[in-house]
Image (cartoon, rainbow, N blue to C red):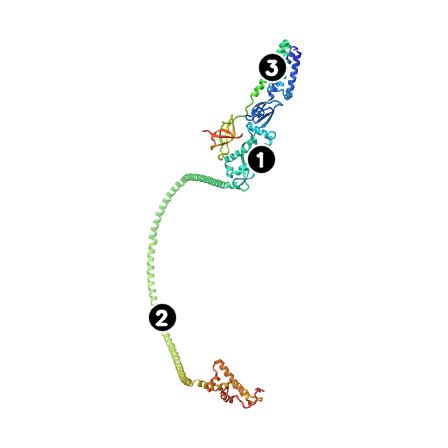
Amino acid sequence: MTVFVVLAVLGFAVCLLSFVFDGVFEAFDLDLAGGFLSLTSLSGGLALFGLAATLAQTSFGWTTLQATGFGAGVGLATMAGVGGLVRTLRREEPETHVSILGARGHVTTPAARPGSFGEVNLRLHGTTVKRSAVSDSPLVRGAEVVVVAEVSATAVRVEPLP
Amino acid sequence: MEFLTPAVILVAAAVVVVLLLAVAVVRRYRIAGPSEAFIITGKKGQPVTNPETGKVSTDLSGQKVVMGGGVFVLPFVQQAYTLSLASRRISVQIRGAVSAKGIRLNLDGVAIIKVGGTEDSVRAAAQRFLHQQDEIESFTQEVLAGSLRSIVGTLTVDEIIRDRAAFASRVAEEAETSLTNQGLVLDTFQIQDVTDDVNYLRDLGRPEAAIAAQNAAIAEANSQQESQQAEARAQEKISGATRDLHLRQAEFKAETDTAQARAAAAGVLAKAARDQEVLLEQERVAERQAALTERQLDTEVRKPADARRYDAEQQAQARRNSEIYEAEAKKASDIANAEADARRVELSATAEANRIKLASEADAQRVRVAGQAELDRRTALANATRLEGEAEGAAIRARGEAEAETMRLRAEAFEQYGEAAVAQMVVDALPRVAHELAAPMSAIADLTVISTDGASQLSRQVGSNLTETLEVVKRTTGVDVTELLRNLTGQPGRADQPRPATAQQPAPPATDPATEPGTVVTPDAG
């Protein structure tokens, strides 16, 4: 039981320290498996292992072996929960590069002369974005166009929709 | 309680640990707001193998760009930077930009820019502006001022003001070249104000402004005219209505007054009618009385008066007749007296007239006789004078004819004798000339000649005078008397021939015996 209590206290202390001094232990590059087995989660699992085993021995009167098994289960479950949470959050990261090819829109400012830039408003993922546009065929104001190429970050090549 | 205490503590500690773990996990999860982007750096990128050279390098995937979502950032290992995607307002002012046709313009523009919303734009902008995001405005302002200046240079004033499409197109081109590579997006660029220093823009609008002002003035005048006309018409109607009202009121009043007067006069009229009847009756009575009185007057006054008047008339007629007769008799006697007087006056006047006539005729006869006598005398005198003159004239004519005959005969004689006759005539004249030359000397009373040569000098003096005279005649008339005489004699001798002639004739009057001796003339006056 004493061992359990020591482990619990140790794990709790480390966990608290890593929380308060966030990132201190990551400096030692202990981050394993993309944050899945970070020092925080390990110390937290260790603390819960000690706590659970102590609780099982003192409150339920279980044997040491039983208490150890119970504590290990709780600790591993905790770590698994943390890892699952992290994985879930990582999956939630948005896709930042979206292709503008094929986007549709209409002409707001016709090109002053062939080959020069006009302006188009494009519908892209539910928002309207403005882009400078060039086209091989003359475009009139309000004409429906489709993007066929991306010239630069702010300019596209468009063709009129039939 | 003692039994529960360790268990509760243990459970509470477990809960605390779970919470710490959860908070630690969530705290590493960063969420980017809608207007910001995260750039997370720190991890190595994925290895990429160049297919041509076989070299292995890492790409930029370790540098992650997150917009509008969450990201799990590992402390220390990764670093997250925030780049604001919010719009930034930039004022652009340029002065003296030259437009396409050379007009200088001052433009105030406003631009809205932002960091582009794509991963590439964020990366590009982060490289340039991450730690100086507040200076994006100042950097871009300079660039846009230059861009605007070049855009204005390609457009006319009209296009700048009116042709938004042309301007926007140029702006898009400029932005593409100058802003996109910095990761910036020009959302909009508008010209707020265009001014110039030479009133070009003001003059552009002046014709339109003048027309607008004119139209406004016309419309104002028209509306004022209409309103005043309407007002006048309304006034006219009001006046008409007032007039009608007053007329009707007057009519009613007249009717009322008439009725009232009639009512008031009814009693008086009735009384007057009765009075009139009474008066008529009285008049009839008076007429009857007058007729009666007249008949009485006829019988009592008129007939006796007629009788008296007839009597007076008869007497007056008789009186007048007797007076007429008297007057006629008197008139006849007056006429006879007057005729007698007139005859007497007439006779005396005739007698006087005859006497005066006779006297004047006698005077006239006397004057006529005296005049006739004078006339006769003058006539006789005139006749005598005429006869005298005729006789004198005849005598002169006869003398003249005789002289003329003499001259003619002499001339004939001269013609016959030629120059001999002329010489003769000259010779005849010379003694007279010498006489004339000596005439001054004849006035000399006493002459004393003192000379060794004796008195011959004096006679020589007369001779030289004559010679000079002949010289004068020769120079003035061309008749050389000396030559003439020489030719006549045919001798070359000079003065011997004429000298005896001259000496003989003037000698007696010129010379005085007293003055014979001496040559110097001394007038002895004294």
**Amino acid type, callout 1:** Glu
Please state the horizontal and vertical placement of residue B342, each as a whole percent of the image.
Answer: 36, 72
Nearer to the camera, B401 or B452 = B452
Q: Chain of mark 2?
A: B
For the C terminus of chain B, which image quadrant?
A: bottom right
SS under mark 3: helix
Determine which quarter of the picture holds residue B143: top right
Tag of residue B338: 2
Q: Would you call the spot at circle 1 few (<14 residues within 10 Å), some (14-19), or many (20 or more)?
A: few
Question: Would residue B335 be found to the left or right of residue B46 on screen?
Answer: left
Answer whether labels 2 and 1 touch (C-beta < 8 Å).
no
Identify the image quadrant of the N terminus of chain B: top right
Residue B77, which numbered label? none
Residue toward you, B436 or A2: A2
Q: Secondary structure at mark 2?
A: helix
- From the viewer's side, name the closer residue of B240 and B469: B469
Residue A60 at x, y = what percent? 63, 9
Distance from disc 2 to disc 1, alpha carbons, whole Å, reads 158 Å
Please say if B526 is above or below B8.
below
Tell me the number on the disc at residue B142.
1
Residue type at the position of mark 3? Leu
Q: CA distance from mark 3 to mark 2?
A: 207 Å
Of marks 3 and 2, the one in the foreground: 3
For label 3, the crowd category at 10 Å Cα-Cα, with few meaning under 14, some 14 to 19 and many 20 or more, is some
Image position of A113 with respect to B314: above or below:
above
Earlier along the polypeptide chain: callout 2 or callout 1?
1
User: Of the residues tagged 1 and 3, which is closer to the observer?
Assistant: 3
Q: Chain ID for label 1?
A: B
Instruction: Tell me where residue B24 appears, x and y as whole percent.
Output: 61, 20
Task: Tell if the residue under mark 3 belongs to the same chain as the one under mark 2.
Answer: no
The residue that mark 3 highlights is A76
Q: Residue furthest front?
A: B53
